[in-house]
Image (tube, rainbow, N blue to C red):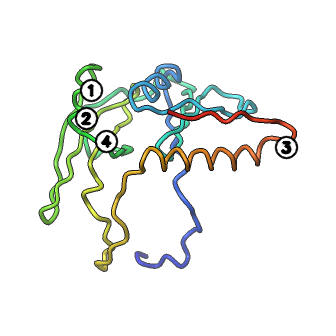
């Protein structure tokens, strides 16, 4: 039932999404060079091909398909398809970069009470939909009319601080105290 969050799971945040790929290498290139995700360590105990990436406060886990030849092929770009969405600083700059990279996209605009959200949609190498938008324009309002939050961009400095804190916490969990880890800044 809607509105009954008392029984909801006690979650903290979205950690990652997993995407099955025809080619992990090709998808790794796309998510790194097109979307700016950084490859990160993946547990060596996995007995299947894959890659992990991280940026913008979220992880993307790429999984090698067991049957790449029978994966669905790309379809036309449809904003109503499954997708992941990212906010950006400049849709004009995103559009310029997509054109330079030869990546087909479509544009859309949503209007709600005089507020406009512009969107761009395109596919990753396997047809998974990516949306880039200025969604921070649209506040998140509950069905009862209460403002829950406004979408906010995470500033690069704040994001870097959060990433460093998360990395330190993760390292503390996974690495013995005797190992000294050199911290490096993520650009």
Q: Nearer the viewer, residue 29 or 143?
A: 29
**Earlier residue among tags 1 and 2:** 2
- Marks 1, 4: nearer the viewer: 1
State the image coordinates of residue 79 (x, y, percent, origin top left). Answer: 25, 43
Measure the alpha-carbon separation of dots 1 and 4: 12 Å
State the image coordinates of residue 145 (x, y, percent, origin top left). Answer: 28, 78
**Earlier residue among tags 3 and 1:** 1
State the image coordinates of residue 187 (x, y, percent, origin top left). Answer: 49, 33
Query: Contact, CB < 8 Å: mark 3 with mark 4?
Result: no
**Earlier residue among tags 2 and 4:** 2
Residue identified by numbered label 4? 131
- Marks 2, 4: nearer the viewer: 4
Q: Secondary structure at mark 2?
A: loop
Q: Which mark is residue 77?
A: 2
Measure the alpha-carbon separation of dots 2 and 3: 49 Å
Q: Is residue 176 above or below residue 104?
A: below
Measure the alpha-carbon separation of dots 3 and 4: 41 Å
Q: Tell which residue pokes out farthest to the left in this image.
A: 114
Residue identified by numbered label 1? 98
Query: Contact, CB < 8 Å: mark 2 with mark 4?
Result: no
Measure the alpha-carbon separation of dots 2 and 4: 11 Å
For residue 108, side relative to residue 72 (left or right): left
Q: Secondary structure at mark 4?
A: strand
């Amino acid at each position: 039932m809607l509105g009954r969050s008392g029984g909801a799971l006690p979650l903290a945040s979205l950690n990652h999404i997993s995407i099955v790929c025809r080619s992990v290498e090709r998808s790794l290139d796309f998510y790194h060079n097109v979307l700016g995700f950084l490859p990160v360590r993946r547990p060596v105990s996995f007995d299947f091909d894959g890659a992990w990436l991280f940026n913008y406060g979220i992880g993307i886990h790429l999984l090698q398909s067991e049957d790449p030849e029978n994966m669905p092929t790309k379809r036309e770009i449809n904003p109503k398809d499954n997708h992941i969405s990212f906010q950006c600083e400049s849709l004009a700059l995103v559009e310029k970069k997509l054109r330079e990279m030869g990546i087909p996209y479509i544009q859309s605009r949503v209007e709600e009470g005089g507020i406009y959200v512009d969107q761009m949609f395109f596919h990753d190498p396997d047809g998974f939909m990516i949306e880039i938008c200025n969604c921070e324009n649209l506040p998140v309002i509950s069905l009862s009319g209460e403002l829950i939050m406004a979408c906010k961009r995470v500033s690069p400095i704040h994001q870097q601080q959060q990433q460093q804190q998360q990395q330190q916490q993760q390292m503390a969990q996974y690495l013995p105290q005797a190992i000294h880890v050199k911290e490096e800044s993520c650009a």
